[in-house]
Image (cartoon, helix red, strand yellow):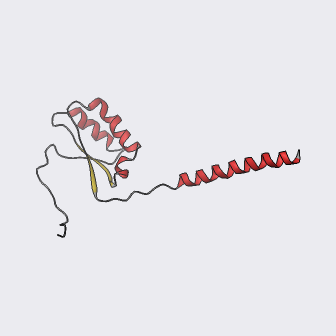
Amino acid sequence: MEVFAITVLSVFAFIGLMSVRSYLFGLVKTKYTDKGLKFILCLPENIGPKLEGIVRQIFMEEIPERLMSDGKLYIIPAMDDEESKKLLESLKSQYPLEMLPDTVSYCMIQERENS
């Protein structure tokens, strides 16, 4: 009987140690570093009803960080879609969003590659 009790206690101790180990490994998150990339989302016409869900899903799954961008989502809305623009303005208070102009007519080169 004594051997059985020690065996049961040993199994519970092993399970406890494994759960503590998995909990501690869960606390340590992989840190993604900013590689200077930008995550740009170009929206089509009439995306308004689905836009909030898309933006929330992108940030719930930490997609900008996983893609090693700067953590912001840059959005180019459709030209005539006022509903999407209003929704994006309200989402700016919750998420790091940047609305880009309808047409981007310039390009900025910050660094030059050495040949």
Q: Which residue is farthest right?
A: 1
Q: Which residue is farthest bottom?
A: 114
Using residue 29 as the reference point, say whether residue 102 is left or right of it: left
Q: Residue at x 25, y 36 (%)?
A: 86
Using residue 77 as the reference point, say whether residue 64 is left or right of it: right
Q: Residue at x 21, y 35 (%)?
A: 44
Q: Residue at x 31, y 59 (%)?
A: 35
Q: Quadrant of the C terminus?
A: bottom left
In the image, is residue 7 above or below residue 28? above
Q: Which residue is farthest left?
A: 105
Residue 79 appears in which quarter of the rendering? top left
Q: Nearer the viewer, residue 15 or 23?
A: 15
Using residue 66 as the reference point, say whether residue 3 is left or right of it: right
Using residue 44 as the reference point, say whether residue 71 is left or right of it: right
Q: Where does the image place residue 94, in percent across and percent down from the top left?
A: 37, 44
Q: Nearer the viewer, residue 3 or 18?
A: 3
Q: Where does the image place residue 55, in percent across and percent down from the top left?
A: 33, 40
Q: Quadrant of the N terminus?
A: top right
Q: Where does the image place residue 108, in percent across and percent down from the top left?
A: 16, 58
Q: Where does the image place residue 17, in percent across and percent down from the top left?
A: 67, 52
Q: Residue at x 19, y 70 (%)?
A: 114
Exactly how many numbered labels are in the figure? 0
